[in-house]
Image (cartoon, rainbow, N blue to C red):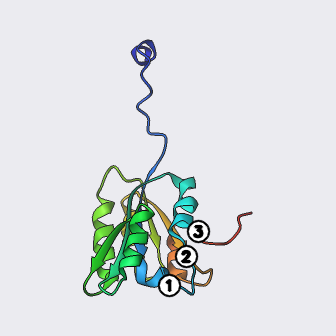
Amino acid sequence: MFLDNLFGKKSSAKTEKSIAVFVDGPNILRKELNVDLDEIKKSLSAFGIIKIGKVFLNQYASDKLIEAVVNQGFEPIITVGDVDVFMAVDATETIFNNSIDSIAFVTRDSDFLPVLVKAKRYGKDTIVVLAEEASAAALKNTADHVIVLGKKKG
């Protein structure tokens, strides 16, 4: 400690948490929900810094949507088959990434409950970001933190 102060080194203590974000594209990025990826990023900023940001899309995603995802700083993951399976596998793998403190799921359904439970079991902080208050009851009741987009805090 004394040597760190003497040589002007900052403490090695981690100050901001690292977040991995998994967005269920077909379920969330729908015209009728009017969800903005920038709003998702802003809502998560209170919990740390996004280090992994992935939006899972099916093979029918338009080039315009894929470009919008990239322009917002997310990695588009295009899948052939069930998007939820690919997202769940990727999120489960991230549980074992020691540089990630929190895992956030952006979805409208409870398909990711097993991954959320496993993330908590392995000490990850869990966040659920929802487009609607009434969606994903099981996730809301299990996650450490719940964000409902468009809902004013306080």
Q: Which residue sits at x=54%, y=55%?
A: 45
Give the total number of marks visible in the rendering.
Answer: 3
Residues under numbered marks 2 and 1 in contact, where contact means CB atoms less than 8 Å apart: yes
Residue 147, which numbered label? Answer: 3
Question: Going by the image, does 117 lie left or right of 131?
Answer: left
Q: Secondary structure at mark 1?
A: loop
- Residue lying farthest left? 80
Question: Which residue type carries mark 3?
Answer: Ile
**Mark 3 vs mark 1: which is more N-terminal?**
1
The spot of residue 123 in percent (x, y) is 40, 57
34 versus 91 height, above or below = below
Q: Is residue 124 left or right of residue 33?
A: left
Residue 35 is tagged as 2
Q: Residue at x 32, y 51 (%)?
A: 98
Residue under circle 1?
30
| Residue 144 is at least partly visible in this image | no
Residue 51 in percent (x, y) is at 39, 54
Residue 5: image location, x then y, percent: 46, 16
Residue 86 versus residue 42 in the image, above or below: below
Under mark 2, the amino acid is Val
**Tag in front: 3 or 1:** 1
Label 2 neighbourhood size at 10 Å, few (<14), some (14-19), many (20+)?
Answer: some
Element at label 2: loop
